[in-house]
Structure formats: C-alpha cells, structure tokens
Amino acid sequence: MKSLPIVSMITLGCSKNLVDAECMTTILRNDGYQVTTDMDKADVAIINTCGFIESAKTEAIDTILSVASMKKPHGHISYIVVTGCLSQRYPDEIRKSLPEVDAVVGTGHYHQISEIIQSLFSMNKNRDWNAYVSRPGSLSHMRIDRMVSTRPYAWLKIAEGCSNGCAFCAIPMIRGKYISRPMEEIIEEAKSLAKQGFHEIILAAQDTTSYGKDLYRKHMLSTLLSQLGAIEGIHGIRIMYAYIDGVNDELIHEIKTNPKVLHYLDIPVQHGDDEILKKMHRRDTVESITNTLQKLRDEIPDIVIRSTVMVGFPGEKKSNFDNLIKNIKLWKFNCLGCFIYSPEENTLGFSMKPRVRSDVAQRRYDKVMTLQQDISLNANQELLGKIVNVTIDSVSDDGIFYLGRTYRDAPEIDSTVYVAATREPLSVGDEVLVKIVDCSPYDLTGVTE
C-alpha cells in the first residue's frame, strides 16, 4: 500500500489563524497523513496566510515564493496549498499571479484539506479550487477534537467573522459576518483540551464580547465563562479581543467572582479622540472608555488591561493625536500595542481624505511606543521584590532560563518572565512561585522560591 504524502504547514498571522491550522493538522493526522514542521521532508506545503493589512500580505506572498523555490522539478515539494485570509480575499489574484500555487482554500473550507490534497495527487485538475472560498453559513466545520502543540495553553475560538464594520478593517469581507459557535460545542472542545493537559484557555474571536448576540439574541460571554469555569482541569480562562461596549456589569461580575477567569482583559480601543473614533465607525467615545476602565479597576483592583491603538488614520490632525497621547497617559494600560493605519481596498477608510503622511504617522507611532515604555516600566517596577505565580511555557534558546508568564501576560504578546530555577528542574506547564529581581519595560527576571 502506497504511503500518504508528508505535509508541512506554515502558519502566519493571528491566534484565529493558529486555531485553523491546528484544526487542519488534526484532520490530516486523523486521515493518516504525517504532518511535520520540517519543510525539507514535505511532499506538500500548506501556507496558512494572513491578509489583514499590507505588511501581512507582503509576508504571505514572500513566504509563498520562498516555498515555491523548493518545488519540483528543482526541489522536493510536489504541491503548494494556500489557505487562510489571503486566499479568502484574493483567490483569483493568487491563481493568476502565483502559478506555483496548486490550490487556494478559504477560511471556511479547511475541513476539506484532506480531500484537496488527495485530489491533487490523483491529478484531478478539473476541480474548481476557487469554489473553496465561499463563506460558511455555520461553524460546523470547526473541530472539537483539535490537537494542540506542546504548550500549557490553548486558544479557543468562540466565534467567526465580524459585523462591527470598523472603517479600517477588512475582516468582515474576508471572514464574513459574526457567527457565534454553539455553546455546547465550545464546552465540549474545552473539555477535550483540558483532558489533553491544557490548563489555560484563551478565548478568541474578532469581538469576544459580542458572543451569543446572533445565536441567543443577547450577550452570553458571562454565561460561557461560568460554564467553562466548571470544567475540571482548567485553571485559567483569558479573554482577548473585547469591545468596550460589551464590557457590561454582568461580565465584570463574572470576571470578579469566577476564580477560573484571569483578572486580565484585552480591549482594543483603537484611539483616544472622539472625532477619530467616529470616523473609524467605532461605537465608543472617550467618556465611555474612561468610565468602563474606571469601573473595571474599581471592581477588580488587580485587573490587568491591555489595548491597541492606531495612528495615522485619515484625517488624524495633530490635535486628535494630542488627545490620544493625553488619554493614553490617563488610561495607563498595562500593555499597549500600536499600529500605523494601513489603507485596505474596499474598506470605508480607503477613500477617506486627507491621508496622513507616512513620516508623520511613523513619528506618532514612535511617540506612542516611547510613552508606553515608560508606563510599562513603571508597572513592572512595582513587581520588584514581590513573589508572583508563574506558568512555565518553554526554555530559552541558550538553555539558561525558563520562560514563563504571570496572569498579567498573554502568550507571545505581553511580558516574558525569565526564571532561574534555584532548586529542582522545571517542566513546561509547571506553576511556580518566583521572586522578581529585575525588569525592563517588557520583561521580568526572577528566581524560584
């Protein structure tokens, strides 16, 4: 019996893409395929792309071209399959401009990945692979028995798409309108992840606080948190991608009283000026953001809040930017990411004028990040000499330190704790008490107690 081809996968972009890649890996392995991280051993390369902003599109295309150089007859790879957001957004352009690509698969059809690979090897060239970019009407294609790589946390997607219509964002046209997953499916997947040993569950969606509005006709995130908290084996639940107007009293109460929900909330506010927020088609105002942040901190004094802002949006004047800086100082986010606006075709912002010059936008970005460095450093300095609970995620490349996180840190985007073990060796997933002895704006160093 002829063995199945070996498949390698490269995943680009956000956590939602990572979940899709893990689902594809599970499908392939269940169907008998060997999935490897070593591209040199692969017969088929899957490139799971991001197409959100220009830099992501450039990275995806560069990756496709790099892998194409390994393709037969000069290399060893037989077929290249491109999946994800770039495929969903630009299927015709990929087929026309990148003939090295053998199949283009959108975000709602990765459950057919085995069928697609099988058809490629059976030389079924009559299939219209662009038929695999239609948007799904449900989330039945999502996996419950998903295999996750060796780490102590797992991302759990609770919804797909977005219906908010922000002027800068292409997600609705890529992934479609907001669709909540049925709660029972989320709970079943969370139980599966807990049985695999994943103690921290990180909730992901384009807007987690809108969970349930389409399916149950009301906000259901707090109810979902309550049910997830009852699952044995789950120690922590982290909420990402919340919207200010969805952070209601019920949700605040659940975060405050549910011992499994980490006192951490990611709320991308995008700007700190009412005029720009309105142009962005955001529902928030500076007042609503300020009031909600204050309520969160009053109710949950140790809560950590991360956010994201954007500079250079069309029409952003110096006065608008000055308001952003003023409010970043007021809001004092524990962690803050900043992006320079990227004009995306077919979005409302694409035709808005006047455009902010790139050098001006870059200076504004630099000013935001310099300000946030001081805020983050002050927050980290408050931990000096204190003993904190740290989850070990990995080991540093030089083997000197263990790399971990406190509840204050989401993986790969927030601070890392460099841990020196003073007694017995540690393992990935261990939760240890660590005394913080040094810090920078972004990282902490400590020793085990």
Image (spheres, rainbow, N blue to C red):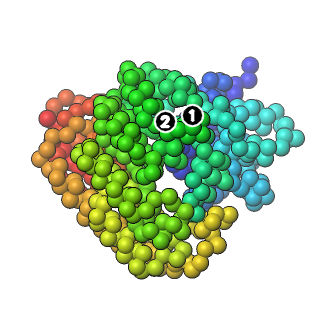
**129 sits to left or right of 336:** right
Please state the horizontal and vertical placement of residue 351, each as a whole percent of the image: 64, 73
Residue visible at 63% across and 66% down?
Answer: 348
**108 sits to left or right of 386:** right
**148 sits to left or right of 332:** right
Q: Is residue 36 visible?
A: no
Mark drawn on residue 331: none
Q: State which quarter of the image contains the C terminus.
A: top left
Residue visible at 68% across and 63% down?
Answer: 346
Please state the horizontal and vertical placement of residue 416, each as a whole percent of the image: 30, 47
Distance from the alpha carbon under mark 1 to that under mark 2 = 8 Å
Which residue bears the numbered disc 1? Answer: 216
Residue closest to the far left: 385
Q: Is residue 130 visible?
A: yes
Residue closest to the far right: 126
Image quadrant in which you'd find residue 281: bottom right
Residue visible at 70% across and 39% down?
Answer: 136
Please state the horizontal and vertical placement of residue 273, each as a whole percent of the image: 42, 69
Residue visible at 25% across and 38% down?
Answer: 390
Please state the horizontal and vertical placement of residue 71, each as a whole percent of the image: 70, 48
Q: State which quarter of the image contains the N terminus.
A: top right
- For the residues labelled 1 and 2, say whether their Cβ atoms are less than 8 Å apart: yes
For label 2, the SS is: loop
For label 1, the SS is: loop
Q: Which residue is at the front of the view, 375 or 65? A: 375
Type of the residue with mark 1? Tyr
Type of the residue with mark 2? Met
Which residue bears the numbered disc 2? Answer: 220
Q: Residues within 10 Å of mark 1 (few under 14, many from 20)?
A: few
Q: Residues within 10 Å of mark 2 (few under 14, many from 20)?
A: many
All told, the count of numbered labels is: 2
Image: 274 above or below 441: below
